[in-house]
Image (spheres, rainbow, N blue to C red):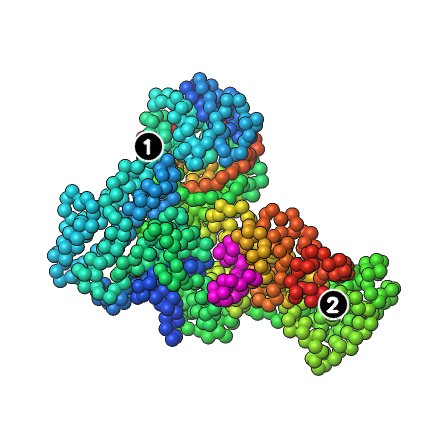
Amino acid sequence: MDYSIFYKDDYTSPDQVNGHWDYFISAFNSSDRVNNVFDLVSADIKYWLVFPEYGFQPEEVPVGSHFLAGNDEAECMLGFLRQSGIQAHHRVCIDITGFIRPHLIFMICWLHGSGVKTFDAIYSEPSQYLKKEDTTFSDGKVTTIRQVKGFEGQHSPDLSNDILIIGSGYDDILISQVAENKNNAKKIQIFGLPSLRPEFYQQNILRAELASESVGRDTGEHHNSYFAPAYDPFVTANVIAEIINKERSMKQLSNIYLCPLATKAQVLGFTIFYLYELSEGGASIIFPFCNKYAKETSTGVSRIWKYTVELP
Amino acid sequence: MSTSKMNPFTITKAVDFSDQEIRDYWVELTNPASFFSEIIKPNAAMPMIILGGKGSGKTHIMRRYSHQIQRIGGSGSVLSDIRTNGYVGIYVRCGGLNASRFFQKGISEDIWTATFAYYMELWFSQNILAVFKDCIAELNDQEQTERSLCNEIEKIFDIPPEQPLSTLDEVINYLSRLQKSVDANVNNAPFLGTLNITVNLSRGSLIFGIPKLLERLFNLENVVFLYLIDEFENLSINQQIYINTLIREKQEPASFRIGARLYGIKTSKTLSGGEENREGSEYESVYLDANMRSWDKYATFVRELFTKRLSIASFIHTETMDQGSISKYFELVDHDLAIREMISRYTQNDKPYFVKLKDKLEAALTKRVAPGVSTNSDIEKILANLAFPQNPVLEKCSTIILYKGWSRKQNLLQLSVEIRAWSAQHHDKGDVPEYKKILSYFKTDLVAQIYRECRNSQSVGYTGIENYITMSKGLPRNFLIILKHVYKWASFNGEQPFGNTPISLTSQEQGVKEAANWFFRDAQIAVDNNKYDVEKSISMLAELFKEIRFSDKPAESSPCAFSVDLTTCTSLAKSAILRAETLSLLISVDDGARQKNSMRTVSKYQINSMLAPRWDLPIALRGTIGLSDDEVNAIFDPNFYDDFTRLKSNRLSRMNAPFQEASRAIMSSNSAMQSLPEEQIELL
């Protein structure tokens, strides 16, 4: 399947984002790139979701926001989604910019399970990360590394040819942690190139290099590093397909693990690919979970993307 | 040799090795017996827990004893090899179970425990049958035995399969289908809030039942069926309880070897009436890195690792090299010569240690806190008395003796006159006790101080293969990682490592520092839910040691260890210290003694030598700093972090001229001083 046939548009300001939706869902944080889009997008019902991991107090968020609660991404999201009123025929738009990754992944799984065939996703690129390559996105310790609910697969006891595909972002500790968690797997990294801003790629590589010992064998060699545009979920999905096809051509894979740590656009690409091609087999999406995330990690807005996602 | 060769130390983890490489890179010392066989005891029925720090070699050892590796290089008959060996190793990684999904999702803990137990039965039995699928063709009566085995396995299930099973492939496929059905249920649990699983096996029925059948049907009497369960730390408490229960209820011919990180054992409880497993009764424990550290052949072992790597990478054409030949690959430094060269760049009055002393004496003169010093002329006389231009190390030693006298409030001018005579005598005869003592115990520190005072960026004591061995602290992976980085830097600097020219000091230094930074960062990777910040604590501790080492009058030679009473510090501080130990950031100084005498209240820990280059600390253990409870809490308990700077300053004021805080402290006998260990008070 060629995922690049899916539609995507880019805009330079939120008021250019065209379309009207029945439901618009966004994750509240302190970033202008999230707030401006929320205000200007046209939808019958708009939801602000407040994730406990950002640590917002009620007085800090807009009136009517939904405070999510639960032990994990499934409990958090199901608590909201089951009362959201969203049904298969509704036009849904999600601003994925401020979402916490596993929650976003789970929500897409729920939409798929609910019969939603298509939805729009908005992603706003930042102009700059606050501390360049030293920016940390998780704001606390990783408490567990596990599969995202709904993406847990049916794994094989034969672990001899496992692969782990990491969408490598800025947080080298997270890269190391997932690599060590699946330490027997062959690790393949996807870097964001073209990156959101020209300098982001170099910053990304500098950080990822710190994880090279954990990533292990063949680190830095060309065939274990791939590239996909940081802003393009569909090309990202194509690159994952290319990796898996190439690996399968060499030997039968025992288990496949995906771990999207880079941009939300790439997270979307990982999720779409899983739902289309991996949901029946020994494959999972894994993630290092933190209790806290930084409320803001970037400044300014660069491009705004709208992706039209079609689900299997 | 060409630098285009692959770095022979690129692979540092056993998980990155293929089965063949596990065997090829294996180093075994067999004099008098196989060290690793003595550790893992593959023929013993008693279960064993193998604990080790990251990089201690657990995975390599456990894989080495697995069937997958044993069959490589075997006789061609798997069954006869198993009979000869007396064991068959079934290697299982807990990481592959993705065990964290058997949790929450609105399902009760009891149901998860039962589900996990069932899942483990299915998972383990697929693993063991996969091993014997390899060798079924070796049986004379293959068809009949295979059918018998399948029939017997069918009978183990409470509800037999709908279709009879007649081949091992069919049994494995049946188990796989059951497992996938559990997977699907577990995956749907978040959406449905329920599990629809029929558990049709009792606990251990396949895990113990299949080995019994294989023993009987394949004529494998006296063979131990060894479940090698690695990465035990990846299981939750309840899941470990289940495995503990299997260990407790073990049925021969099966047995277990459990591999876990030092922090990996979360409980010793079982499901057997709430009983706990006891070491010596239900299982044995092996502390792998402690064993390695106390092993008299550890240095020989890692040298052979080194030689084997070079041999496989075709740098050399032999698998044995003597110590001297290996040492030649690394440039070594003559510190006395280097210091003479460094100091020769200064005039007598500009020598950095004299400039520092002069500054301190002048400041003290103003405040009238330098005993016996009344004028600037006295200072000049003191400096002249300490001068011994032909031997800078002796001059440095003389300054230390003067600082010691200062701390005791001796008349410094008079003392300097004596020092003048002593230094000349020691230079001629080497028999002045004060100099002998300092040069014997503190020389490395003096050299390090001179390097630092001369702003020489080179560190002291981190080059050469013998130092790498010391730094690795019983963790062979650390040894390999140092070499990996040294090789990398040497190549980057245009050298030809392991060729005809030794690897330069610069490349060694760069490599060692990078390895140290990796090691410190690596500790942050361990997932931890606790409230302490071990990395911050180690940084504070190392900073304290560093400042003591570079103080005017170091209290201890080569400070890199501390003693602590774990019964009197806060519980959070104690937890942080123990956590640091399990991460190998701290090493218990006498592992053996601690295990033998758990009632002892004072424990001693050394900062892992891998970290030494990061803070310019020594790698060899000599001095142990006794930390007060207040200091321990300030370093390891987040609730007291704010006290650290003050307490550190208090301690260092007793080691740096003009030693005023020490005097006041002695006079006031405050509570912090009362809690100081005896050796510290004595030194004052």
Instruction: Mark 2 vs mark 1: give the one in front.
Output: 1
Q: Position of residue B347 (x, y in %)?
A: 77, 67
Q: Residues within 10 Å of mark 1 (few under 14, many from 20)?
A: few
Mark seen at residue B404: 2
A126 vs B342: above or below: above
- Image quadrant of residue B562? bottom right
User: What residue sits 37% from the left and 21% below the top?
Assistant: A90
Q: Position of residue B175 (x, y in %)?
A: 23, 47
Chain ID, mark 1: B
Residue furthest bottom in the image = B429
Q: Chain of mark 2?
A: B
Q: Which element carries disc 1, helix, strand or loop?
A: helix
Instruction: Name the amino acid, label 1.
Output: Leu
Q: CA distance from mark 2 to mark 1?
A: 75 Å
Q: Write the residue at 49% across / 65% down.
A: B597
Please report the bounds of the magenta region as a residue range.
B578-603
Q: Indicate which disc residue B192 carries.
A: 1
Measuring from the top left, give residue A307's x and y in whole percent: 42, 28
Vertical side of B516 occupied by B421: above or below: below
Q: Amino acid at mark 2?
A: Lys
